[in-house]
Amino acid sequence: MMEAYDRFELVINDRIVKTPIAIASMAGIVDAAYVLERADHIGAAFIGGYSIDRRTLDASEELARQGRREFLYDDPVEELGRQIKLLEKSDVVPGINLRGSTPAAYREIAEAFEESVVYEIDAHCRQPAMVEAGCGEYLLHHPQALTETIRALKAAGVTVSVKIRAGVAADDRALARTCWKAGADILHVDLMDFGHQKLRQIRNACPLTLIANNGITTFDKAMDLFARGADLVSLARGSDTWTLSGLDAAITRSADENGWYNAPKQLCRGGDIRSLTFCCMPVKNCPLIPMLEKIGLTRDDYVKFKQEAVKGTPLAEGNSTCFGSLAWCCKASSPCMFRNMTLQKMGISIQDYMRYKHRLSDKIMHRLFDDGSAADTV
């Protein structure tokens, strides 16, 4: 698993994620057996959705009578315990997608299984019976209820994911920040038909681990979303073993070739906030200037922070580059004779250069969000 960490540097719930591909929940379909059949080519999986209290159990039974597939059982803790036990034999990071009508219902489940799984709040289901029960899209229209649910789970000391459907809440950027401020760790976003522009907005609004979902069955689609802020992509109906194995192989090969599997596009080409790692000094009129204004950084603060962030790393070197340091150099896919000559002289591969840029990007994200200076951007 250390090879996987070196390749993707991706950890969820204190476990290494072997590949940035997840399976999303599908009620009545995705259980432990479903995941284990596909375990060779996924890094994480969210089983469920599982209803966990009387109101949502009744809603599940109503949906089943209407012909929809549902997981039906008498005791949620017993059923979830059985499913979680089966997943223990796998190296897939397990998550459970839950549908409850009160924060207390989620807290009860978290107290039963503690840190063994990721707890995903289903704020995604749009079936009227579930919405009337106070879960699914109800939570997107009542953000205070969502906040209370996140906090109830975090009070139990567990890792929390929130599954949402883009375009339902009044403002997805505000929703993302609400989830982050409440303590969520992961935002699992069904993008519907919005595509990468919506994901970029969400990435620029919060530092959460982002999972992009909906129709991502090809390498090109996955890479497009990685370049706009996704940390993982998830599949539901398209999660057959042939598709998963192809995606896994292609993403792994790309990561080995490029060094940073989800490197953003450069800012001047539509990149998200992470792309500041590739920006040069703010000396010309380019997209960097309005971005700095939006996130509340002066030009001097940006320069000083970036210089400090690369101290003690190879990115601090590079006298023959445009601005005297690799800190200001662009993405490896952009041709640059001076950057490449510097890397060759230092004995640094393009892959390692991109890994150093990845770590610089992480420092930028911490600076912007941990210090609270980042504002909503587009």
Image: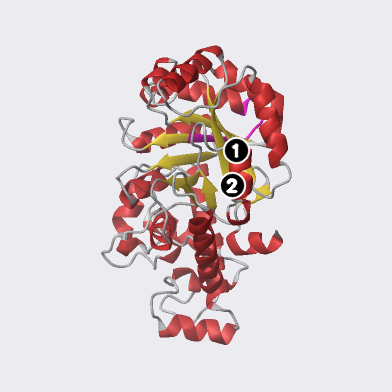
Q: Mark 1 or mark 2, which has the lower sequence index? A: 2
Residue segment shown in magenta: 154-162
Q: Where is 275 relative to 73, above or below?
A: below
Identify residue for label 1. 95
Residue at the spot 64% in from the left edge and 32% down from the top edge = 158
Crowding at dot 1, Cα within 10 Å, few <14 / some 14-19 / many 20+, comes out as: many
Identify residue for label 2. 44
Crowding at dot 2, Cα within 10 Å, few <14 / some 14-19 / many 20+, comes out as: many
Residue at the spot 49% in from the left edge and 20% down from the top edge = 60
Q: What residue type is labelled 1?
A: Gly
Q: How many labels does the image show?
A: 2
Left or right side of 245 for 142: left
Q: Position of residue 213 (x, y in %)?
A: 43, 45
Q: Where is residue 93 in the image (x, y as percent from the top left)?
A: 64, 45
Corner quadrant of residue 265:
bottom left
Q: Is residue 158 visible?
A: yes
Q: Which of 204 and 79 is in front in this view?
A: 79
311 is within the stretch colored magenta: no
Q: What residue type is labelled 2?
A: Ala
Instruction: Report the Cα–Cα distance between label 1 and label 2.
Output: 7 Å
Pointers 1 and 2 in contact (C-beta within 8 Å)? yes
Callout 1: SS: strand
Q: Where is residue 122 in the image (x, y as percent from the top left)?
A: 48, 29
Quadrant of the snapshot with the N terminus: bottom right
Corner quadrant of residue 283:
bottom left
Residue at the spot 58% in from the left edge and 60% down from the top edge = 8
Q: Where is 201 relative to 169, above or below?
A: below
Q: Which of 367 and 171 is in front in this view?
A: 171
